[in-house]
Each structure stands twice: as C-alpha cells, then as structure tokens.
Image (cartoon, rainbow, N blue to C red):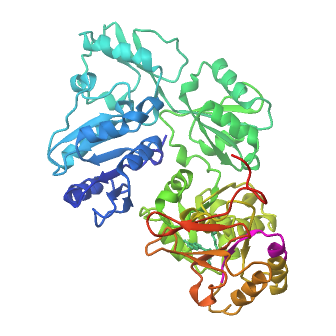
Amino acid sequence: MGASNIKAPAIVILGNGALATAKRIQQMYPDALIHGLAERVEGADRSYAEFGATLRLLYQQDTPIIALCAAGIVIRTLASVLLEKGAEPPVLAVAEDGSAVVPLLGGLGGVNVMAREIAAGLNTAAAITTSGELRFGTCLLNPPSGYALGDLELGKRFVSDLLSGESVRIEGSAPWLAQAQLPEDDRAQLAIHVGYAEREPSANELLIYPRNVLVAVDASIANVADVVRAALHDSRIASQSLACLLASETDMANPALHAAATDLGVSVRFTSQASAIDMAQQVLPQLLPPISPVDGVAIAVAPGPLDIDRIGRARGRLAVVGLGPGATAFMIPAVKTELARANDVLGYETYVRMAGPFRADQVLHCTDNREEMQRARHAFELAAQGRSVVVVSSGDPGVFAMAAAVLEALHDSDNAHWHAVDLEILPGVSASLATAAQAGAPLGHDFCLMSLSDNLKPWGLIEKRLDLAGQADLALAFYNPISRSRPWQLGRALEIVRQHRGPQTPVTLGRDIGRPGQTLRVTTLGDLTPEQVDMRTMVLIGSSTTCVFDRADGRQWVYTPRWYGEKPEK
Ligand code: SAH
C-alpha cells in the first residue's frame, strides 16, 4: 500500500493558546488540517462547534487525531466509541505548549511512530508505554506499509515470548528491523519470517508477508476471487502477499471484478492489454515471465513490495456531492470523506470555497455558475484519466443542481472511458429542508418543490404548475425565486398562488440558511412582497392547513399537520 492510503491527521485545538504548537505540528504533516473550536480559535483551517462529536466522527472515519489538550479529555470523549472498532487510527494528546507527547490509541496504526516524530519536532520525548516498542524500538506487530502481518493473536504471543527474554532469528529481508534492538541469535527458537511463500502459522514464528505479488485476471472467468485464491495456493504463494489485481480496461466497470477485489481485500488496477499474461508483462516487464497456473490468470512476483499507484492505472471516480446549506455540521460524513480523497474539485467558486479548505495537492477548478454542461464534461475528462474527481453543489446535487447535468453529459457521450468511471451521487440537505427545519415543519405534509427560473423552461409551464399545485393544496418551496435578470416572475407567481390561498397563509423566508448572517422570517402570503426576497432566499408557502404559534423565545413555530379534515383522536 502506498503512502497515499494513510490519511492525513487532524490537529484538534480548543483555544488560541494551542495554535502555535498546532502550526509547528502542521509543518511536520503538511496535509493535516487544524480544527479549531468555533468562536474560540482564529486562524484554524476548519472550525467545529462541538468537541465531542467532532472527535468521535474523526475517530470513526479513521482519521489520525492529534488533540492539543489533556489526555483525560480525549479518553473520556472517545470512551463511548472505543468498543465499536477493531482497527483504530492513531490518537495522541499533546500538551498545548508542546512540552509533552502522549500516544493514547492506535498502537497497530503507528501511534508510537507518530509520537516519536512529533516529539522530535517539538524537541521533547514521547511518552511511549508499549513494552515491546520500548524494548525493541519498533512495534513488531505493525510492519511498514508494503508488508502484512500474518496473524495478530499469534503475533501478540510471539512478542510476549520475546519480552520474557527469548532470542530471535530473522529469516528473509526485513530492512526496517535493521535499526531495531532485537535479541538476535542465529540458533534462536523464535524466528521472524519474511516471505511470500505459503507457510503454516506456528507459535515460534512471526510471519510477515511482503505485498509483492500481482495477479492479472481475465474478468470473464467465473468466481474470480476463488480462482485467484486457488491459483495462489497451487503456486504455493501466500494470499497475504497479494498486492493488487490487474485487469483489462474493458472490464473497468465489471461488478464481479470489483466484488472479487473487495473479497480479496485489494484494489484493482487496469491496463490496455486483454490477456492476463500480456497484462502482467505490460506492467512488470522487468520481471521474470509471469506464471499462469490456470487459464485467465497470471501471477507476477516482484522482488519487494509493489507500489500499486505505479501499476497500470486506477479506475477513475466521479462523485457529485451535496454540501448541504452551508455549515459543515450539516454535511453528510460520506461527502467529507469524498472531499478528502479528491484529486480534483469542480464547481461554482462560492461552493468550492465552502467545501474547503483543501490540501496543496488538490486541484480546484472554479467556474461560473452557468457553465454546468462544460463543467460536467470536464469532470468526466479528468475522471477518465483515473483521477478522483468531485463536483460540488450546494444543498442536494439532485435538486436544481449538478447531478442532472453530469448524467446528461454521460448520456450524451459514447466515450467508453467516461462510462467506465465509478460515478456516484452523494446527497445533501437541500435548502428547502434546512429552512423548513429551522421554522418547524412547514413541509410536514405533501409539498412541491419548484424552481422559478425560466432560464431552461418556458414561463408558461411554470404558471401552469403553480396553478395546479395551488389547486392541489400542496405546500410550496420556491428555489431561484428572483434575480436581477428575472425581476417580475416572483410577483406573477404570487398572483397565481393567491388565487388558491388566503392572505393569512403562513410564509417562511430563509436567507443564507446555515451560512454566516443567516435570517429566518415568518410572514403571511398577504404581506409578502418580492422586495423581501432575493436569489439567496428560500420561499416556503403553506397549504390551507399550515399554522403558526408562538415559541417561548418570542419567535414563531410554523407547521403543516400530518392530517387533513378532522383532527384525529390521539
Ligand atoms: N441544490 C440546491 C439548490 C440550488 S438552486 C439545494 O438543494 O439547496 C439555488 C437556490 O436555492 C437559491 O436561489 C435559493 O433559493 C436556494 N438556496 C440555496 N442555498 C440556500 C441557503 N443556504 N439558504 C436559503 N436558500 C438557499
């Protein structure tokens, strides 16, 4: 596995006093973002409202955490989620002034390595408490990337045997152990064995497998995963040494192939060749000829761990994501994860900025709001090169936004590379729902979402729909209600609605909901004028049953009951 698969850490601080130390740590991990408590910290890369929820989310997303606060706070905060996970990310507490570095969790995820790195950068010592690590200077159960540990439980026993005073032999090539202080002895009972050959696990051996084997497959064979396992076994090669699968570009979207890769726990890379032998030869020409124990499968063994990022190319990915109305707390976690893995981010500049901050290696392509089809095609061109591309929309990408444009571009295209892209649409909280939630439940019964923009549809159709929705007594949510180039349309729309609804009908106006300076206003259809509305406003018009009552804080709740006609008995 290449270094790109290790997530950048999050540096979490609670006050400005920790900012200087946080910035020093950030210099050691340039991809790390500083998360600061909103209203307390100025100059952080991201701000968060709630410490506990933020820390738990980072932990659940496998993000290494460097928290600049008391170790106890971190422990108490993560306590409730600790039992959920097998593997966990490194979690460290660092004293605000940089005087102490305490690795807390993630021994197998390399927390002690990080603690040492950070401590060295801060000119202090790491508080390492792991016995094996202290004695041998390395965690034997956490081999470097490119190597896989055979069995964790056997491994723990092996390390405790070593700690009790036994000596050890090293078989095979383990360059990272050169610096370790191991009690080596050529006649030792215990052995650390590094190699790709299949081997029976035993209590006397710590098995470590280099991930140096590549299997090229013709994806049209049945049961790819089983065939690959059997082929490796027949060749006496350990499946733990499998670094990746290799397949033909024509199989890029083949679901059975991807299921097999998931089953085998490896990624798939692609080449232009068609036969398994040719594929393997194309990506690893310097090696001995690959072996083909069965038809449709070829095995190539490299002298050391494979850097899979350099083998053939990846299947490109394109995610069309919704950022929600604005505040990051309203962005779904899957979108955050997608933004973190993006190579390229495309969108209207305001939204791209809203989705940030980004790392220096991420390429931003900001365009004007009106160039949607061009942006969609550009996204496919990038993704078809094997890149991971994100197109951002505010709210939900499927609501008057980029998802339909992206699908239209794909539908219009006969480029097989575009169709092979791993395309996914990730939802977001749409402006109407975010506004409704703040007002209460004005969309609590049947409702209708409309864009009042007549840029891409005839105004006559909008009038007809308004009239029918009015007749049907649907609550209404207006997107794009007004703009400089569309000054009269909202007034005309309200005329039509007023033919069906009384002047007392509750109206909710949400402006910049979820963004700085947001406003929420409850008025009535009778009092509503187009001057109260601009292009950053969401207009929610009630149905005949929508009602309003006072809140204890002096504002008002708006809701549309779930029932019609007679109020049902409780
Ligand atoms: N995809 C977006 C909508 C894009 S259309 C979504 O699902 O929310 C743009 C319109 O959405 C704007 O003219 C405005 O009416 C509304 N809108 C978008 N964000 C908003 C916000 N934060 N507050 C209020 N209205 C918003």
Image quarter of residue 372: bottom right
Q: Using the image, determine if residue 100 lies above or below residue 396.
A: above
Q: Residue at 24% across / 22% down in the picture? A: 131
Residue drawn 44% across the image and 29% down it: 83
Q: Left or right? Give the position of 289 relative to 106.
A: right
Residue 139 at least partly seen: yes
Is residue 385 in sight in this rendering? no
Residue at 64% across, 23% down: 232
Q: Position of residue 382 (x, y in %)?
A: 62, 64
The front one of 422 and 21 is: 21
Q: Nearer the viewer, residue 183 or 363?
A: 363
Q: Which residues are magenta?
A: 468-481
Q: Quadrant of residue 76?
A: top left
- Quadrant of res 456: bottom right
Quadrant location, ligand no. 1: bottom right
Vertically, is 529 above or below 369?
Answer: below
Compared across the picture, whether 222 is left or right of 225 comes to right
Question: Which percent across, then down, holds residue 20?
Answer: 20, 59
| Residue 171 pos. (x, y %) | 39, 18
Magenta stretch contains residue 559: no
Q: Position of residue 113 (x, y in %)?
A: 29, 37
- Of residues 561 and 65, the one drawn nearer to the viewer in this rendering: 561
Image vertical order of residue 552 relative to residue 90, above or below: below
